[in-house]
């Protein structure tokens, strides 16, 4: 399968470049299969690249195909800016993103390792370029919905592969790691829920909503459970504003109850498997009772060495990963912090964390405003999906390396936001 990964990688890259540079293709309308529509080359490129984020094609012999593919996508997007007829839409939240990237660049001047600083910065550059390309290339609703539906069917296939041992073994390394995969499912869950409210296919979309929600509970992935709850809460607030408070409260309560009601989840969450919800209600549980699977120890070592006495500025962009790889024994040979929030603080200080968080909040607010200012349900569908999925994915920053999985994780909410910007401008 390792050799086939390289073959699949080459084929995918070839078609991405081919579609981008051609005049376009006639394809079927995803909402009415009897109709055919013409998509431009850049639109076809977008459909392919947006829908294949879950395909990793990882290779174990020293070739990081995932990083290479990420770089190729960024290069092709930059080439695409010169091909598409419309200019990228630089919204106010994306201006904040540029400020954050500028701060990362400053951090490269005092980092422990410039090469690691550049690598880290590129991981954050990708979602912005991806978003801007979508805002420029998407010319109509058909292209946007086709790319989203295609991405969802790829995700459905990945859910099936995840729970069938034979297929999981067969497609090992073809799709992303389980943690990145389930974070991706958060965005697909939100999209399915939005489709439930804005299309006539109620049963299918409700089924897919449940399908994408279940893996985090079945596989006991606590970070993704947190992200899923956050996404549903964010979705409810955009959809119903203050009227959503009872729904939000209910979702949060169900999330807490599930931790204690599902024995396997409770056993994984706490050191003492007899920990009860009554103790939680009495305030007798704190972080010392939570089993973080070595994370708390790792975070403490990183903050003691890279954050303390550098609270505002951090130790420089890329310092966290460099420090961990330079001291493998201290971190049991782990190469990533398992918390993007910790890495942000250690690398770029409170300033960096605040700027990035402000950008995420600004995008969510912008999606909220677009949703309530437009009367077009097509725009509402994408604004709702973009805002809620971004909050859900951002919540996973707490205890996972979500930024490292950008192609599978951040590409989807930022892609949805880029398509929201495009539709909001062109469907008015």
Image: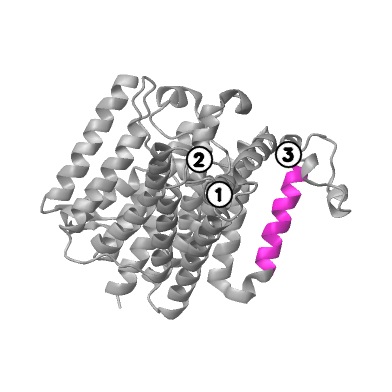
Q: Are marks 2 and 1 in contact (CB under 8 Å)?
A: yes
Q: Earlier in the sequence, mark 1 or mark 3?
A: 3
Q: Earlier in the sequence, mark 2 or mark 1?
A: 1
Relative placement, left or right, of 357 versus 39 is right
Q: Which residue is mark 1?
A: 314
* Numbered disc 3: secondary structure: helix
Residue 65 occupies quadrant: top left
Q: Measure the alpha-carbon separation of dots 2 and 3.
A: 30 Å
State the residue at coordinates (63%, 75%). 243
Residue 350 occupies quadrant: bottom right
Q: Which residue is mark 2?
A: 319
Q: Is residue 319 magenta?
A: no
Residue placed most toward the observer, 202 or 139:
139
Name the dominant secondary structure of the magenta segment: helix
Q: Position of residue 418 (x, y in %)?
A: 35, 61
Q: Which residue is mark 3?
A: 269
Q: Quadrant of the N terminus?
A: top left
Q: Between label 2 and label 3, give the one nearer the viewer.
A: 2
Question: Would residue 254 be seen by someone viewing this image from the given angle?
Answer: yes
Q: Position of residue 211 (x, y in %)?
A: 53, 45
State the residue at coordinates (50%, 36%). 321
Q: Are marks 1 and 3 in contact (CB under 8 Å)?
A: no
Q: Position of residue 263 (x, y in %)?
A: 76, 37
Mark 3: few/some/many CA within 10 Å (<14, 14-19, 20+):
many
Residues drawn in magenta: 246-262
State the residue at coordinates (77%, 38%). 270
């Amino acid at each position: 399968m390792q050799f086939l990964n390289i073959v699949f990688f080459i084929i995918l890259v070839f078609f991405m470049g081919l579609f981008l540079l051609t005049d376009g293709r006639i394809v079927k309308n995803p909402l009415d299969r009897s109709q055919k529509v013409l998509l431009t080359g850049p639109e076809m490129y977008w459909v392919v690249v947006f829908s294949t984020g879950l395909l990793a094609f990882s290779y174990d012999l020293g070739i990081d195909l995932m990083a290479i593919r990420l770089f190729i996508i960024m290069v092709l997007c930059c080439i695409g800016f010169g091909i598409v007829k419309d200019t990228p839409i630089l919204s106010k939240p994306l201006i904040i993103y540029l400020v954050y990237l500028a701060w990362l660049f400053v951090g490269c001047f005092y980092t422990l390792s410039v090469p690691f600083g550049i690598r880290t910065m590129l991981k954050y550059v990708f979602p912005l370029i991806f978003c801007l390309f979508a805002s420029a290339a998407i010319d109509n609703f058909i292209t946007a919905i086709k790319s989203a539906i295609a991405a969802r069917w790829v995700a459905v296939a990945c859910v099936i592969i995840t729970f069938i041992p034979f297929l999981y073994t067969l497609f090992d390394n073809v799709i992303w790691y389980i943690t990145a995969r389930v974070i991706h499912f958060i965005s697909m869950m939100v999209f399915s829920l939005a489709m439930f409210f804005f299309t006539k296919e109620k049963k299918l979309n409700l089924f897919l909503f449940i399908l994408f929600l279940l893996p985090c509970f079945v596989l006991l992935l606590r970070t993704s459970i947190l992200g899923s709850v956050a996404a549903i809460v964010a979705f409810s607030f955009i959809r119903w504003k203050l009227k959503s408070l009872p729904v939000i409260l209910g979702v949060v309560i169900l999330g807490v109850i599930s931790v204690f009601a599902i024995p396997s989840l409770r056993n994984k969450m706490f050191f003492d498997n007899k920990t009860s919800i009554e103790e939680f209600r009495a305030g007798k549980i704190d972080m010392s009772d939570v089993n973080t699977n070595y994370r708390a120890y790792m975070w403490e070592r990183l903050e003691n060495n890279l954050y303390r006495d550098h609270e505002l500025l951090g130790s420089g962009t890329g310092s966290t990963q460099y420090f961990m790889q330079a001291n493998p024994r201290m971190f049991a040979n782990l190469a990533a912090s398992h918390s993007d929030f910790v890495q942000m603080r250690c690398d770029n200080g409170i300033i960096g964390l605040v700027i990035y968080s402000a950008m995420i909040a600004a995008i969510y607010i912008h999606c909220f405003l677009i949703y309530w200012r437009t009367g077009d349900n097509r725009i509402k569908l994408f604004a709702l999906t973009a805002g809620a999925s971004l909050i859900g994915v951002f919540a996973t920053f707490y205890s996972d390396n979500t930024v490292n999985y950008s192609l599978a994780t951040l590409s989807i909410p930022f892609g949805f936001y880029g398509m929201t910007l495009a539709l909001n401008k062109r469907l008015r």
